[in-house]
């Protein structure tokens, strides 16, 4: 870990064109690995400075753009541009789904609910509410009964211990 930190310090110093930090110099002097790293970094730096790439010809960009246009990479005008940019596939799928749902919904005649159906649904709702209120009344008691019984047993045990200790005291 220390060698990685020292290598980082060496790299930062060479990037900033500064001499090696005083804290890193003894470590470089002791370690052949760090000396080799420093030499390699300096060699790479010299090679990159010596081999500066030649500037690109001025007509290179125009030639590339002509090749792209001739290959048909630019989309044609009109509907294809609008479709490619503004209608993603998920939106089309959603529109189709909504259209099918709307057609199915509008083709079905409205269902006429009878009075018996309404009274049956009210009876079912009433029974459900009654069952829910009964559950609300009984659930806390059912959940706390084991805890209550344990507390009673603990109280009985404490009473027995108190009586034993008081009887044992002379």
Image (cartoon, helix red, strand yellow):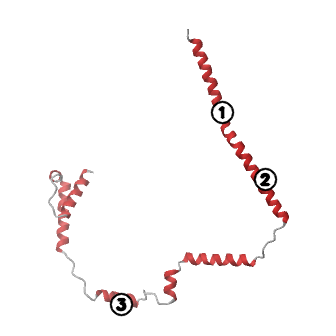
Q: Looking at the picture, does residue 88 appear above or below residue 80?
A: above
Rendered location of residue 99, percent (x, y): 65, 78
> Residue at coordinates 83% horizontally, 61% vertically from top-left?
119
> Residue at coordinates 16% horizontally, 64% vertically from top-left?
17
Q: Looking at the picture, does residue 95 appear above or below residue 114?
A: below
- The residue beneath circle 2 is 127
Rendered location of residue 92, percent (x, y): 58, 78
Quadrant, the C terminus = top right
Q: Determine whether, in the image, residue 100 is placed left or right of residue 39.
A: right
Q: Looking at the picture, does residue 59 appear above or below residue 38?
A: below
> Residue at coordinates 50% horizontally, 87% vertically from top-left?
80
Describe the element under mark 2 as helix, strand or loop: helix
CA distance separating discs 1 and 3: 87 Å
- Mark in front: 2 vs 3: 2
Describe the element under mark 3 as helix, strand or loop: helix
Rendered location of residue 13, percent (x, y): 19, 60
What numbered label is drawn on residue 168? none
> Residue at coordinates 15% horizontally, 61% vertically from top-left?
18
- The residue beneath circle 3 is 66
- Comparing 104 with 134, the one in front is 134
* Labels 1 and 3 touching (C-beta < 8 A): no
Describe the element under mark 1 as helix, strand or loop: helix
First along the sequence among labels 2 and 3:
3
- Mark in front: 1 vs 3: 1
- Comparing 57 with 87, the one in front is 87
Q: Residues within 10 Å of mark 2 (few under 14, many from 20)?
A: few
Q: Looking at the picture, does residue 86 appear above or below residue 131?
A: below
Q: Determine whether, in the image, residue 145 is placed left or right of residue 23.
A: right
- The residue beneath circle 1 is 148
CA distance separating discs 1 and 2: 31 Å
First along the sequence among labels 1 and 2:
2
């Amino acid at each position: 870990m220390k060698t990685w930190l020292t290598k980082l310090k060496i790299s930062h110093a060479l990037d900033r064109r500064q001499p090696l930090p005083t804290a890193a110099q003894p470590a470089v002097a002791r370690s052949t690995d760090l000396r080799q790293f420093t030499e390699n970094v300096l060699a790479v730096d010299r090679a990159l400075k010596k081999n500066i790439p030649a500037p690109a010809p001025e007509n290179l960009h125009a030639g590339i753009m002509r090749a792209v246009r001739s290959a048909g990479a630019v989309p044609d005008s009109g509907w294809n541009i609008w479709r490619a940019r503004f209608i993603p596939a998920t939106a089309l799928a959603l529109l189709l789904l909504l259209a099918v749902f709307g057609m199915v919904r509008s083709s079905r005649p409205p269902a006429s609910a009878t009075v018996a159906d309404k009274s049956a649904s009210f009876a079912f709702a009433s029974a459900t509410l009654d069952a829910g209120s009964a559950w609300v009344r009984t659930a806390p008691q059912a959940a706390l009964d084991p805890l209550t019984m344990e507390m009673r047993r603990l109280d009985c045990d404490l009473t027995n211990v108190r009586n034993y200790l008081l009887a044992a005291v002379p």
